[in-house]
Image (cartoon, helix red, strand yellow):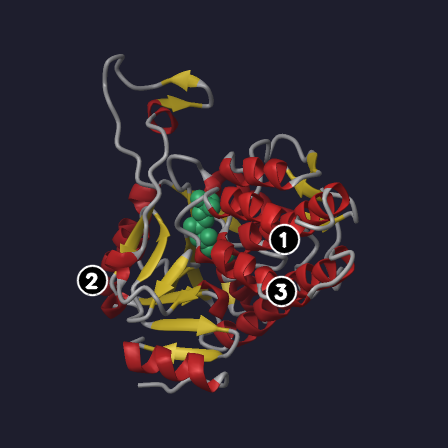
Amino acid sequence: MIKGGYMHSNRYDSIRAIRWLGNGVELLDQRRLPGEASYLVAKSATEVAAAIRDMVVRGAPAIGISAAYAVVLASGERFRSSPASWKQDLEVDLATLRAARPTAVNLAWALDRMLSHIPELEGDPVPTLAREAKRIHDEDVAANYRMGELGAALIEPGSGVLTHCNTGSLATGGYGTALGVIRTAFARGAIERVFADETRPWLQGARLTAWELVEEGIPVSLIADSAAAYAMRRGKVSWVIVGADRVAANGDVANKIGTYSLALSARYHGIGFMVVAPTSSIDLAATDGSAIPIEARGAEELLRFAERPVAATGAGGWNPVFDVTPAELVSVLVTERGVVTEPTEARIASLMSAGSPAPSA
Ligand code: MRU
């Protein structure tokens, strides 16, 4: 594993999944975890786009960071092969990257941020763009530390928390969003146990979140997705804590399929539902959740399990991999700029324009 994190034992922060090598980007291959920690080095935008599509790297902020490094690789290649027209030639790479996965807005956000520097560039674009990609990466980690502090402050000592999918170091530049809050809260002694949903069908919870938490020595109990409501009923859960692939202007949240069911169950049981997402995941252009494109992946992810068929031969499948949780089910949205209690359009607008702590209810 790429052990690039801060090794302070009280931070539970030893994992990094993305590393810039100067001539390529090294990615911890998430398809092979937890059995094998192996790396893939992507040396072109096409290879990074394939890595995103094939889930070598996944998780909204990690997708954006990888794409930013891909722009550095592509601009270097285009500049070397045709210095006069590299800016136009780059457009095809940007289009390939943009199309790699549809739901996480961090992808478009990172590409647009990289793109905003291109008009002013003269000569070799690599040094400037590499600096910007690194800045995007570092800012993401800093945002996660900040969100960790803000979110953990809401968790009472002795809590059990439930999380979904993987929102940790593997899904971000490092530390994690929801898992960053869990890391910080555990370090402060507020969390006794983490319940991790398996997260069918790709099993991000079983394969990745359980792995990260075991690596850090944070107690984790894996549960079937369908056990979540019962865990709440039994009083084992004080907070449901999840990440986001895209937050709409009105506070609706697109996240891994199953998040909506968790929010409904949490509301029924009177349990807090915390969404932890950097402002790079907020899309003010999406008025509400209905404007967010929801990725559907191949039915074979459902019909097969670890390569083996599990469904009756001849059965079809429907595999939307994200869903939308209406804002009214969200208790708090934790961002690096502040906490928005019961998010509404006005509160999110105020968060985004002020750039400072958001208003609360
Ligand atoms: O399909 P994935 O594994 O890319 O989905 C990831 C999620 O849904 C995460 O919850 C989200 O990206 C937030 S990660 C910090």
Q: Is residue 22 left or right of residue 56?
A: right
Q: Is residue 33 above or below residue 155?
A: above
In this view, 357 is above or below 169: below
Residue 327 image offset from top left, x and y in percent = 27, 68
Residue named by callout 1? 87
Which residue corresponds to mark 3? Answer: 119
Residue type of the residue flagged with mark 3: Pro
Q: Earlier in the sequence, mark 3 or mark 2?
A: 3
Sequence-wise first label, 3 or 1: 1
The residue tagged with tag 3: helix, strand or loop? Answer: helix
Q: Which residue is mark 2?
A: 268
**In this rendering, is residue 21 above or below 277?**
above
Q: CA distance from mark 1 to mark 2?
A: 53 Å
Location of residue 50 in the rendering, given as x and y in whole percent from the top left corner:
55, 35
| Label 2: element kind | helix
In the displayed structure, does residue 52 sit left or right of residue 197?
Answer: right
Q: In terms of secondary structure, where does tag 1 sit? A: helix
The percent position of residue 119, horizontal first and vertical second, equals 62, 65
Residue drawn at (20%, 62%), measured in percent from left and top? 268
